[in-house]
Amino acid sequence: MIQLSTIRNAAKTLQGKIIRTPLVYSPAFSEMTGMQVYLKLENLQKTGSFKSRGATYKVYSHLDEIGPEGVVAASAGNHAQGVALAAKQAGVPATIIMPEWASLSKQEATRGYGGEVILAGKSIGESIAKALDLAKSGGKLFIHPYDDPEIIVGQGTIGLEIFEDLADPDLILVPIGGGGLISGIAVAARAIRPMTKVIGVQAAASPSAFRARQTGGITPVETRSSIADGITIKQTGRITFPIIQEKVDDVVLVEEDQIAAAVLMLLERKKVLAEGAGAVPLAAILGSCVEMRKDSKAVLVISGGNVDSPLLGRIIRQGLFRKHRIMRFSVYLDDIPGSLARILTLIASLKANVLHIYHTRSGRKLSINISRVELELETRGPEHIQEITDALQEAGYQLTPDLYDC
């Protein structure tokens, strides 16, 4: 059984080796929800994720036992980087097994922290199996991403820091995949302030912890692709599940569009870059997935900020479309000097920002003296789009319905 005293000892071990991340109040999210919302910014942790805590505590707890072969772990991202950096700080070698589909940026980040990367396995499960083989045959210490008491204890130091900075939170919302993070935080919360509710938030695309709570046992689930890939786990951990059952008040699910909206909201309103898994607590409160009492104090654990740049670009773009911040349409213009300038002048007078223009004179249905112009505009929202639409139509422009997007 993991005790609060063990977590306190872990905090002493980690002092100076990890970052004590800030807990910040968000006026914007508080106003949106009617609660007092605080963000625990683990995206500012070393390697950009909470995983450095557990990995560092695990390595330093076994430093006298780790042989010349060092440590081995399996991960597609955050755990890989956390273990690599922890081993580098401790002066021991680290071998990281990553699945064949692991992103190039995360492979390079892991190498940058000193880890030897081996690509093996079509799933995390297969990568873990390979890592276990290396541990048995090569004398390496295996570091599990979540189902390990010392990993749980290391992650639990987040809970200590939350209560040191805010004595009386009513809710702590935590991303949940395999359960290591929420288990550690829940142990600390139950010991320090039992009336504080701890709620796990999981992507609906991978509801392993949610199903386990429903059935009362570890239940493997089919997973779908999710932008919250850091918590896409087929089944909850053997060690973490009993802790979750005993000490976590509820587990809720959020959908992909809610997660994407939360990533964009954190970036726009707080200038906080969160990966999909790190943004699920905000998605839960903005989507009213948890019972919220007015003026209650809610802490959202923003667990990481390691999002690939191409994915971030898609999230931002899709988010802007869904919030009606981008308008796209096409018009047909007389192919004479000044036609394009006139419509752009009208758009400028309406205070819309032109993002893209595509101008063509070719097409089977185009007359010889007509050109088609596709325009993409940045707008303030739905009312602004309607204002632009009305003004263009009053000026005689016909917006092509099949390309019009508001």
Image (cartoon, rainbow, N blue to C red):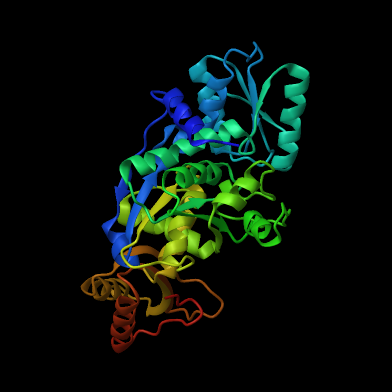
The quadrant in which the C terminus is found is bottom left
Q: Is residue 303 above or below residue 324?
A: above
State the image quarter where residue 98 is shown. top right
The quadrant in which the N terminus is found is top right
Q: Residue furthest left?
A: 349
Spot occupied by residue 200 in the image (x, y as percentages of width and height) = 53, 54
Q: Total label count?
A: 0
Query: Is 23 placed left or right of 123 in the picture?
Result: left
Q: Residue at coordinates 31% horizontally, 61% vertically from top-left?
A: 30
Q: Residue at coordinates 48% horizontally, 81% vertically from top-left?
A: 367
Query: Is 205 placed left or right of 164 in the picture?
Result: right
Residue 111 appears in the figure: no
State the image quarter where residue 296 is shown. bottom left
Spot occupied by residue 52 in the image (x, y as percentages of width and height) = 49, 32
Spot occupied by residue 289 in the image (x, y as percentages of width and height) = 49, 66
Q: Is residue 161 above or below residue 251?
A: above
Residue 223 appears in the figure: yes
Q: Nearer the viewer, residue 312 or 356?
A: 312
Query: Is 149 placed left or right of 285 in the picture?
Result: right
Q: Nearer the viewer, residue 334 or 29?
A: 29
